Image: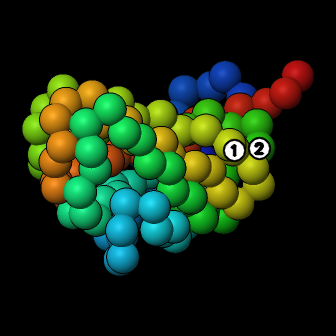
Amino acid sequence: MSSIFEATAGSAIGPTTGGTVTQATNKGTAVTLNTESGQITMNGAELAGAAEVSFQVNNDRVTATDVVVVNHSSAGTAGSYLVQANSLAAGSFKVTVANVGSTASEAIVLSFVLLKGASS
């Protein structure tokens, strides 16, 4: 079986290596998870309604041309958060979480997967 590193842009991706990590200090704290997919348990600090927070994910598997798919997968109030990956670079990406509900102190779990991309 091929590894994800041998995948070409636009090709289907099979099983990936996964992992988990938990934010230590607050919702803006960076995390490190060097896997092609995984789950990030955010810190349970308060996030006001209509507020957003961003944090960096250090990941040596990501390149600037990849696509990161991330979503709110469990814990917390379903439908109260909008999640997106942004600021991709070699070795890291950022995740922004917006609270579209009321003020909450929930340690939500985010799931992500890297899709190999190309600029040409």
Crowding at mark 2 (Cα within 10 Å: few <14, some 14-19, many 20+):
some
Q: If you read the primary sequence from the N terminus, does the residue marked by circle 2 or circle 1 appear first?
A: 2
Say if residue 6 shows up in the picture. Answer: no
Looking at the image, which residue is at 75% across and 50% down?
89
Crowding at mark 1 (Cα within 10 Å: few <14, some 14-19, many 20+):
some
Q: Is residue 88 left or right of residue 59?
A: right
Q: Using the numbered discs, state the Cα–Cα distance from disc 2 to disc 1 in whole angstroms.
A: 5 Å
Looking at the image, which residue is at 25% across and 63% down?
45
Q: Quadrant of residue 114?
A: top right
Instruction: Residue 51: give x, y in percent of width and height.
Output: 37, 39
Q: Is residue 19 left or right of residue 13?
A: left
Instruction: Residue 27: give x, y in percent of width and height.
Output: 37, 60
Q: Which of these two is toward me, 46 or 32? A: 46
For the C terminus, the image quarter is top right
Instruction: Residue 62: give x, y in percent of width and height.
Output: 66, 52
Mark 1 belongs to which amino acid? Answer: Leu
Q: Are marks 2 and 1 in contact (CB under 8 Å)?
A: yes
Residue bearing the label numbered 1: 88
Q: Residue 65, relative to residue 92: is it above or below?
A: above
Residue bearing the label numbered 2: 64
Looking at the image, which residue is at 51% across and 67% down?
30
Mark 2 belongs to which amino acid? Answer: Ala
Q: Is residue 48 left or right of residue 38?
A: left
Looking at the image, which residue is at 36% across and 68% down?
26
Residue reaching furthest to the right: 120
SS at mark 2 in the image = loop
